[in-house]
Image (tube, rainbow, N blue to C red):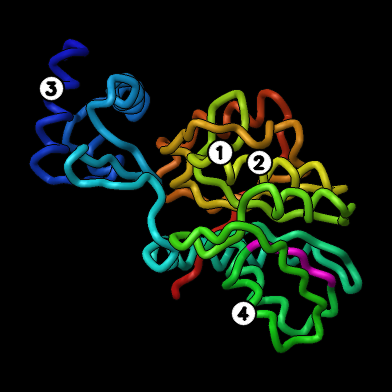
Amino acid sequence: MPELERQRKILEIVEKKGSISVNKLIKLIGVSPATVRRSLNMMTDKKLIVRTHGYVHSLDNINLTVRPIDERLELSYPEKRAIAQAALKFIEPGMNIILDSGTTTLELSRLLLNHKLTIMTNSLDICAVLSQTQNTVMCTGGIQDGRTRCFLGPDAVKFISRFEVDAAFMGTTGVRSRVGLTTSSPLQADFKQACVSSAKHVYAIFDTSKFESSSLYTFAEFKDLDLMIISKPEDFSTASTFFEEFDEFGYPYVTVEARSK
């Protein structure tokens, strides 16, 4: 099927459905995942569609590229829980850590209720979870983002840049091949870069849906990461390109298998 014909077919499906998962689109188009992703990248560049975590949306069906946190909490819950449990192994009593905002780091915070740590975060939800524990919780302050329920802006960056911590646990909006982790917001990028710079060790924790999205702003290169903790995909064909790249260049990662909720 010629490229333009394939793009017309994709656009017809997306406009009819409003939103569709990339995996389902691959099955409907009937070509390789790499071919579909290449077409989607070209269509995104032409501003014909909008891509988010593992989904493609028509322009009429989306207003913002980042879903509210309440919606994201319902997505891939078993995967996020498994990732959080794997990340817990790298946290020891008395450590000073950064928890980035996001649903996977929020799951990690729920596993820290009985720990005695110093935890810095820009997440209102993480602060709430840890508010009545023996942890010392330091909230950055700054400009509140209502959709993600976190603080951003110069004050948040200035706060986090004052410290050197043992470890930062970072979420991501997307993953860019041969580059690193990405986000759709320049304010998020500034804050996340500050977190990476302030940490002795950086752990990226995310599910494989992030492989389907490459956002505009890069906040960490793969070489900046001590480890990526990633959910084990049901279909390795959709993530195989990234895992092959990680193996080729020696970027450390582990995959974890989700259990039933």
Q: Earlier in the sequence, mark 1 or mark 3?
A: 3
**Circle 2 is placed at which residue position?**
190
Say whether residue 50 is left or right of residue 119.
left
Q: Are marks 2 and 1 in contact (CB under 8 Å)?
A: yes
Say whether residue 222 is left or right of residue 233.
right
Residue shown at the point (91%, 72%) measured from the top left = 94
Residue shown at the point (59%, 68%) measured from the top left = 106
Which callout, 2 or 3, points to the residue nearer the camera?
2
Which callout, 1 or 4, points to the residue nearer the camera?
1
Q: Amino acid at mark 1?
A: Pro
Q: Are marks 1 and 3 in contact (CB under 8 Å)?
A: no
The numbered mark at residue 128 is 4
Residue shown at the point (69%, 33%) measured from the top left = 222
Instruction: Give coordinates of residue 187: x percent, y percent.
Output: 58, 44
Instruction: Measure the alpha-carbon separation of dots 1 and 3.
Output: 32 Å
The numbered mark at residue 8 is 3
Q: How many marks?
A: 4
Disc 2, SS: helix
Over which residues does the magenta segment extend? 118-122
Location of the N terminus by quadrant is top left
Quarter of the figure with residue 84: bottom right
Q: Amino acid at mark 2?
A: Asp
Dot 1, how many residues are within 10 Å of its Cα: few (below 14), some (14-19), or many (20+)? some
Instruction: Measure the alpha-carbon separation of dots 2 and 3.
Output: 37 Å
Instruction: Give coordinates of residue 109: x percent, y percent.
Output: 66, 72
